[in-house]
Image: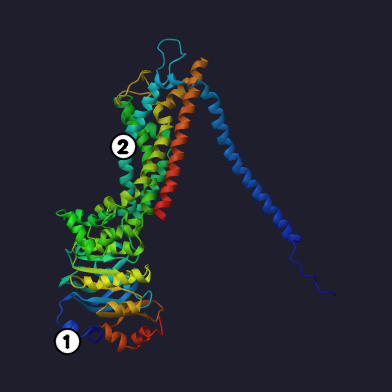
């Protein structure tokens, strides 16, 4: 029974021209996350591919954020969180013995829902990680490059010494992206990066994601379906399942190319969600 | 039977309830007024008696030698207090801040609670008890010294610094820690690179409050650093040194009114110092909290 479920859940890459050529970055197998006794996400099987944008969509409380936070071990910060199943990053068990969460996070960066620049200058925000990670050589150039990649350089180049808190919300979020890029990660996770931003700032972030895709693997959690449809190559739909004891858990309902998810989903629940009939 | 008249006016029981409510309100206001009045009376009476004896000499000269207590000042005690509180701060600041970091950033919740309770209990220990503890530990074998006094003051200050620091560390948004950790920065670098710098203003004001408290301490100093101290300026922490509070204690007990006047003047000076430092620290903390919260 379990085996059958696993087979159904994993997206069949052979029939996807998009995924076929791609290297798999993350591989989740029967991944469950618990908070204490509470099962938050149940039996997730998914492959996330290199240099694609993968969107995670679904209703509130379905475990989208929990899932994305397992990818860079931010779940470690919640003392009650526990995992079962397997999660491999480029073939290595992320939660295996000897794997250092700090090293994982250096390779898998993250941009959060609410822009969270440090109360430091614009320059120091980007340079912070570089200095600590020992990438002090050509600091100025690295900072400039990161700010350019985040499409922020032009707006801030004359006031790098000013406090980052004086920037607008959208600029702050791009600064956070620059800060993440500067550390030269391989993957960048976005946890609802535009939900606190206005439409213009949102569109700037989305354009930026298209640019970043050339160099990075991106995973984005969003509750905005249009956003997923606009930016993502692959989309995973997480749903809520109510167990007989009334407890709720997140499950991966469907995972496919974005176009398929939005135009011709295989699962009724996906269809209901993307057409706005529930959630 | 006529229809009952519909009315929204106060009547019967409600009138009584409102009366009780007004009375309780008046009692509470009275109690609050009394508390403030006591403070005002203390401040005014100390200022009244102390301000007259203040002059430049009081702050810049020492007690004249011999049997004439007139003139001169308490410079030696001001310097002594400075040395005592200064060394105590040097000990208590790092200990208190590190303890706070441990409770707020590193310790598992259960252990953090235990340490927090321990700090609160230490804060509640009568200072004379801390004094006698340090006395048996140090002064008995090595004699009285300002250093022993400073250690007692440091024990008094650590819980104050730690609790004040912890409070501001908790105000630093989790998002800041996450931002740093998500860059692949380790826990302790995050603490010292992001959390502590954000909280530095609060740590500073917390320490100032602890300094104000330590400057006013007398009990532990009485048997740790008073005997044989000189009434000339001395800054050697290995000697017993005088302090403002000890001067108040000793001079107020003297028959000569010139001494008593000096005791009042010293009391006034100390009170001003403590009031001003705690007030400005509290104001700074309030401003700082607003800034962090916003």
* Real-space CA distance between mark 1 and mark 2, rounded to the nearest whole angstrom: 67 Å
Callout 2: chain: B
Task: Say which residue label 2 marks.
Answer: B91
The quarter of the picture where the N terminus of chain A appears is: bottom left
Residue B280 at what x, y percent from top left?
A: 44, 40
Q: Is A38 located above or below residue A154 in the figure?
A: below
User: In terms of image quadrants, where is residue B131?
Assistant: top left
Number of marks drawn: 2
Number of the label disc, if any, that sits on residue A115: none
What's the colour scheme? rainbow
Q: Are marks 1 and 2 in contact (CB under 8 Å)?
A: no
- At x 53% / y 28%, what residue is drawn? B47
Task: Say which residue label 1 marks.
Answer: A14
Locate residue B253 relative to residue A241 in the image: left or right. Answer: right
The answer to whether residue A56 of the structure is visible from this angle is yes
Residue B141 at what x, y percent from top left?
A: 29, 26
Q: Is A51 located above or below residue B268 in the figure?
A: below
User: In terms of image quadrants, where is residue A86?
Assistant: bottom left
Tell which residue pokes out farthest to the top in this image: B67
Q: Residues within 10 Å of mark 2 (few under 14, many from 20)?
A: some
Q: Secondary structure at mark 1?
A: helix
Residue A68 at what x, y percent from top left?
A: 28, 71
Which mark's residue is nearer the viewer, 1 or 2? 1
Q: Residues within 10 Å of mark 1 (few under 14, many from 20)?
A: few
Q: Is B70 located above or below residue B165 in the figure?
A: above
- At x 41% / y 10%, what residue is drawn? B66
The answer to whether residue B255 of the structure is visible from this angle is no
- At x 34% / y 56%, what residue is drawn? A165
Callout 1: chain: A
Locate residue B156 relative to residue A233 in the image: left or right. Answer: right
Query: In the depicted view, which residue is nearer to us: B261 or B142?
Result: B261
């Amino acid at each position: 029974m379990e085996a059958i479920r696993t087979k159904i859940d994993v997206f069949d890459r052979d029939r996807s021209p998009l995924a076929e050529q791609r290297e798999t970055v993350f591989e989740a197998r029967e991944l469950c996350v618990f908070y204490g006794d509470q099962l938050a996400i149940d039996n997730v099987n998914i492959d996330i591919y290199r240099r694609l944008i993968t969107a995670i969509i679904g209703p509130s409380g379905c475990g989208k954020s929990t899932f994305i936070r397992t990818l860079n071990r931010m779940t470690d910060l919640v003392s009650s969180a526990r995992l079962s199943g397997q999660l491999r990053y480029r073939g290595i068990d992320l939660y295996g013995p000897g794997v250092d969460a700090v090293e994982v996070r250096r390779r898998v960066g993250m941009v959060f829902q609410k822009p969270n620049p440090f109360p430091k200058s614009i320059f120091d925000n980007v340079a912070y990680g570089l200095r600590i990670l020992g990438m002090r050589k050509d600091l100025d150039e690295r900072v400039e490059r990161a700010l350019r990649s985040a499409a922020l350089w032009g707006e801030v180049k004359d006031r790098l010494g000013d406090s980052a808190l004086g920037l607008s919300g959208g600029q702050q979020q791009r600064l956070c992206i620059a800060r993440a890029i500067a550390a030269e990660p391989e993957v960048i996770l976005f946890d609802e990066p535009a939900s606190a931003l206005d439409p213009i700032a949102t569109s700037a972030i989305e354009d930026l994601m298209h640019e970043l895709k050339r160099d990075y693997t991106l995973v984005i959690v969003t509750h905005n379906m249009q956003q997923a449809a606009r930016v993502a190559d692959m989309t995973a739909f997480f749903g809520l399942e109510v167990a007989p004891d009334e407890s709720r858990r997140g499950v991966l309902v469907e995972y496919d190319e974005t176009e398929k998810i939005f135009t011709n989903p295989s699962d009724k629940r996906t269809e209901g969600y993307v057409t706005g009939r529930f959630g | 039977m006529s229809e009952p008249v519909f009315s929204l006016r106060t009547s019967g029981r409600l009138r009584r309830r409102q009366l009780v409510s007004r009375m309780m309100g008046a009692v509470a206001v009275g109690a609050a007024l009394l508390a403030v009045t006591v403070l005002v009376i203390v401040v005014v009476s100390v200022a009244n008696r102390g301000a007259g004896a203040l002059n430049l000499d009081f702050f810049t000269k020492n007690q004249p030698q011999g049997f004439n207590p007139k003139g001169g000042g308490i410079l030696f005690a001001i310097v002594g207090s400075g040395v005592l509180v200064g060394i105590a701060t040097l000990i208590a600041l790092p200990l208190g801040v590190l303890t706070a970091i441990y409770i707020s950033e590193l310790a598992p919740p259960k252990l953090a609670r235990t340490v927090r309770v321990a700090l609160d209990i230490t804060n509640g220990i009568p200072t004379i008890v801390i004094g006698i503890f340090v006395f048996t530990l140090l002064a008995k074998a090595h004699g009285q010294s300002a250093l022993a006094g400073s250690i007692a003051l440091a024990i008094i200050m650590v819980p104050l610094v730690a609790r004040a620091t912890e409070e501001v560390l908790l105000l630093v948004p989790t998002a800041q820690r996450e931002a740093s950790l998500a860059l692949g920065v380790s826990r302790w670098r995050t603490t010292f690179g992001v959390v502590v710098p954000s909280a530095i203003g609060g740590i500073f004001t917390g320490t100032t409050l602890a300094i104000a408290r330590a400057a006013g301490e007398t009990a532990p100093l009485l048997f740790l650093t008073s005997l044989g101290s000189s009434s000339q300026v001395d800054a050697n922490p290995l000697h017993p040194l005088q302090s403002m509070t000890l001067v108040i204690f000793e001079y107020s007990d003297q028959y000569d009114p010139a001494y008593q006047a000096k005791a009042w003047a010293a009391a006034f000076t100390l009170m001003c110092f403590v009031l001003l430092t705690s007030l400005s620290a509290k104001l700074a903390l309030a401003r700082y909290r607003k800034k962090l919260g916003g």
